[in-house]
Image: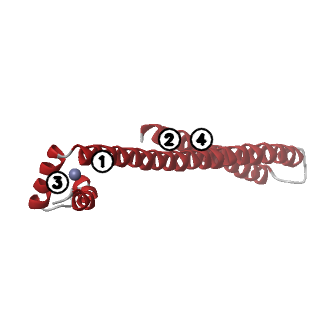
Amino acid sequence: MNCEEIKNLMMGYIDGELSDEQKSLVEKHIEECEKCRDEYKSFVRIKEVTEDMRLADLKEDIWAGYWKGVYKRIERGAGWIFLSIGAIILLAFGMFEFIKSIIFDPSLSLIVKIGIFSLTLGVVILLVSILRERLFAFKKERYRDIER
Ligand SMILES: [Zn+2]
């Protein structure tokens, strides 16, 4: 085999796509021919560099996706928390005013006052519970990101 033929086989050799027979032909020629040996070395270097580049690209993609996911989750978590805090403050304030006016209303019977008070208290407790659940889920999601 001449140098030209070996050159044509070299990429296949580096990629491990040749038959055993072709492989030993290339190996024997590289051993004997300095020109092809240099060529072979530069091919190997090119392959290494392009593989490193591909790997770096892949890593960057993964990191970009990772941070986008983390950011989105933090954003959602924070959004939920602020929404819940705002809702609780406004509702608590409104209910406080509402309860005040009911308690001092002499035309309502005690049992109706108790009913309304109990109802509003229940709503506030449920809201606090939802907020706590969101906070907990938020923390857990952050932890999962770190773990992964
Ligand atoms: Zn040669």
How far apart in space, not on screen, are marks 2 and 4 (Cα)? 9 Å
Query: Label 4 is placed on what type of residue?
Result: Leu
Q: Is residue 140 above or below residue 28?
A: above
Q: Is residue 134 left or right of residue 56?
A: right
Query: Label 2 is placed on what type of residue?
Result: Lys
Sooner in the amino-acid sequence: mark 1 or mark 3: 3
Q: Residue at x 85, y 54 (%)?
A: 108
Determine which residue is flagged by label 4: 135
Which residue occupies the foreground of this view, 114 or 137? 137
Sooner in the amino-acid sequence: mark 1 or mark 2: 1
The N terminus lies in quadrant? bottom left
Which quadrant of the structure image shows residue 67?
A: top right
Q: Residues within 10 Å of mark 2 (few under 14, many from 20)?
A: few
Sooner in the amino-acid sequence: mark 2 or mark 4: 4
Q: Residue at x 9, y 60 (%)?
A: 21
Determine which residue is flagged by label 3: 26
Determine which residue is flagged by label 2: 140
Disc number lying in front (4 or 3): 3
- Residue 73: x percent and y percent? 59, 48
- Residue 118: x percent and y percent? 70, 48
Determine which residue is flagged by label 1: 39
Sooner in the amino-acid sequence: mark 1 or mark 4: 1
The secondary element bearing badge 3 is classed as helix
Q: Is residue 76 left or right of residue 92?
A: left
